[in-house]
């Protein structure tokens, strides 16, 4: 089981990590919520374990980013000292699948994580409707006019950026940084991926959705 642990108490994180790795789990660590969201965006996990009380961005805010912006359906457990009913209701309404109050035994955490893994990803997260498109963020596929289209990771990432900005134009620079970060590819890489995305998403249909705005970038139409 591959797990991401968000915990700013280094001693507790190391203790939990030592136990979970000892029972066969693989762990990534985040010590603030922003790096947690970044890791979720870049990697695949079987379960996410998030502390709520964090400096700056909280675990609740990280959960909102993971569920709403990233549309990630990975099982998520909150690990927190907040034990009131109101706190638990807020946690579940934000998007967690389980809630474990500190202090706790690591054996119980492992047991709950195994149960979450067996349950699998949530089915109520990861579907989005945009115009004539139905986007499945879990499987990185798109349905148009009853036809399911599977996209490669880079193409899917480009489509997400276009959807997020639509109906506005997205510049080449914005798309390149969103997909490749600071490690920018060769100058024609974006054009090649956009051509492939259009070939997959538009070519089989009468009405093109992706338009090039010369000198500015690309736009996704809503019709």
Image (tube, rainbow, N blue to C red):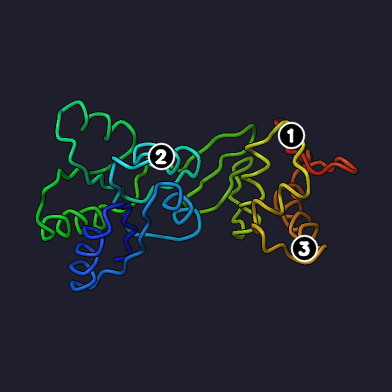
Could you tell me residue 214's position as x and y percent? 90, 43
Query: How far is mark 1 from mark 2, CA to CA?
Result: 37 Å
Residue at disc 2, secondary structure: loop
N-term-proximal mark, 1 vs 2: 2
Q: Which is closer to the viewer, label 2 or label 3?
A: 2
Residue extending furthest toward the top: 86
Going by the image, does 205 lie left or right of 148?
Answer: right
In the structure shown, which secondary structural element does the residue marked by tag 3 occupy? helix
Q: Nearer the viewer, residue 191 or 59?
A: 59
The numbered disc on residue 221 is 1
The first of marks 1 and 3 along the sequence is: 3
194 above or below 184?
above
Disc 1, disc 2: CB below 8 Å? no
Badge 2 density bin: few <14, some 14–19, many ≥20, Cα 10 Å? few
Residue 152 x %, y %: 61, 60
Could you tell me how far apart the alpha carbons at marks 1 and 3 are, in whole angstroms? Answer: 23 Å
| Residue 163, quarter of the rendered image | top right
**What residue is shown at x 40% (from left), y 47% (from top)?**
33
Lateral position of residue 42 relative to residue 157, left or right: left
- Which residue is identified by label 3? 189
Residue 15 drawn above or below residue 40? below
Measuring 26% from the left and 43% from the top, which residue is drawn there?
Answer: 97
Would residue 63 be found to the left or right of residue 195 on screen? left
Q: Look at discs 1 and 2 and give the one toward the viewer.
A: 2
Question: Which label is found at residue 56?
Answer: 2
- Which quadrant of the rendered structure holds the C terminus? top right
Asked where in the image residue 2 lies, by quadrant, the reply is: bottom left
């Amino acid at each position: 089981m591959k797990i991401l642990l968000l915990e700013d108490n280094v001693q507790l994180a190391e203790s939990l990590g030592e136990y979970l790795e000892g029972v066969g789990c693989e762990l990534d660590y985040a010590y603030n919520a922003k790096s947690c969201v970044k890791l979720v965006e870049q990697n695949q996990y079987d379960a996410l374990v998030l502390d709520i009380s964090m400096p700056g961005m909280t675990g609740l805010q990280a959960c909102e980013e993971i569920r709403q912006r990233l549309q990630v359906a990975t099982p998520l457990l909150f690990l927190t000292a907040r034990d009131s009913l109101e706190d638990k209701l807020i946690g579940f309404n934000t998007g967690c699948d389980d809630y474990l109050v500190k202090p706790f035994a690591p054996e119980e955490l492992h047991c709950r994580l195994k149960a979450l893994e067996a349950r699998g990803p949530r089915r109520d997260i990861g579907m989005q409707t945009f115009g004539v498109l139905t986007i499945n963020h879990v499987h990185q596929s798109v349905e148009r006019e009853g036809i399911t289209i599977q996209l490669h990771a880079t193409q899917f990432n480009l489509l997400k950026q276009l959807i997020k900005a639509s109906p506005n134009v997205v510049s080449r620079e914005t798309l390149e940084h969103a997909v490749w970060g600071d490690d920018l590819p060769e100058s024609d890489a974006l054009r090649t991926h956009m051509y492939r995305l259009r070939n997959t998403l538009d070519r089989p249909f009468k009405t093109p959705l992706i338009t090039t705005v010369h000198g500015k970038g690309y736009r996704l139409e809503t019709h």
